[in-house]
Image (cartoon, grey):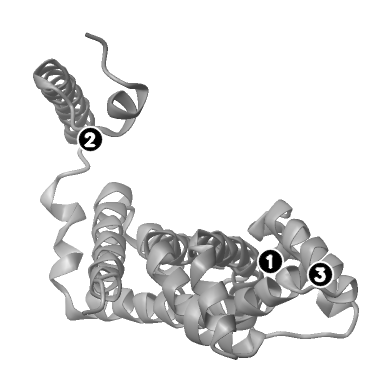
Amino acid sequence: MSRPLEDILFGDPGPEAQTTTRAVSMTAAAVLLLLAMGVVMRFHGAGQFEARLWKFFAWPTTWAFLASGLLGTLASAAMAAVIALALGLVLLLGRLSPLRLARYPSIAVIEFLRGVPTLLLIYVCFLVLPSAGIKLSTYWMLTLPIALSTAAVVAEVYRAGVLAVPRGQTDAARSLGLTEAQVFFLIVFPQALRYIVPALVAQLVIVVKDTTFGYVVTYGELMQNAKVLIANYHALVPVYLVVAVLYCLVNYAISKASRRLGRPMH
């Protein structure tokens, strides 16, 4: 007897599917392990794991320099995230507005910022604005473009969450005499946030990664400082491995914090 389509798509996998999944997972893990071993062997053959290329990590000044770059990354990413979350909400309200004068401009801004690469926006702040007499610090040359680019995506993430809230919640709130603003901010939006926590976390991770564009404006973030270390000590692989670990730790901390925010309220 054939299973219903809903069970096939959304039901628990059967014994055969579980066996196939385990086999595919083990094969993929083995392939990745072999690739990693191959990369390590190539680096070892090139002398990238020699002690002389790692000894400067024993110096406190090296870690202080990396820490200053990490602080620069976190400062830019945090400010960009705050601006993006706030501006994304403004764009969402404009897009959902029944007034065409608010809705159409909001849609145009969202689509424009989503379509333009973040790097191009950084070049605008770095090259175009100074020629027009608008001078920004390197911090804002990096932070503002990242914030604008992320805000457009966040607005769409917000909208997806709002549309996921059951219509009955809105109707029930209106029947109690709440205004449209009260319905949105007290009933709809808080529930929408619970739906979109994973998507927002993904965007925050992208914000952290986008700060690596700081080299364009010579802003002192983690990757920029890493390039200085590489230029001074010619330790390409060691520095990039350490920096990769630092980025992973930051993104893991963001994901860990998001799990607390994403827990259902009792």
Q: Mark 2 = which residue? A: 43
Residue 148 locus on image (x, y percent) = 66, 71
Look at the image and tell me in which quarter the N terminus lies.
top left
- The disc, 1 or 2, on the residue closer to the chain's N-terminal end is 2
The mark closer to the camera, 1 or 3, is: 3
In depth, the one of 242 and 77 nearer the eye is 77
The answer to which quarter of the image holds residue 52 is: bottom left
Q: Residue furthest front?
A: 175
Residue 122 is tagged as 1
Is label 1 in a helix, a strand or a loop? helix
Question: Looking at the picture, which amino acid does disc 1 mark?
Answer: Ile
List the residue tagged with mark 3: 103
Q: In this orientation, does residue 223 appear?
A: no
Dot 2: few (<14), some (14–19), or many (≥20) neighbours within 10 Å? some
- Of mark 1 and mark 3, the one earlier in the sequence is 3
At x 31%, y 64%, the residue is 251
| Count of numbered marks | 3
Instruction: Give, as a three-letter code, the residue at label 3.
Output: Arg
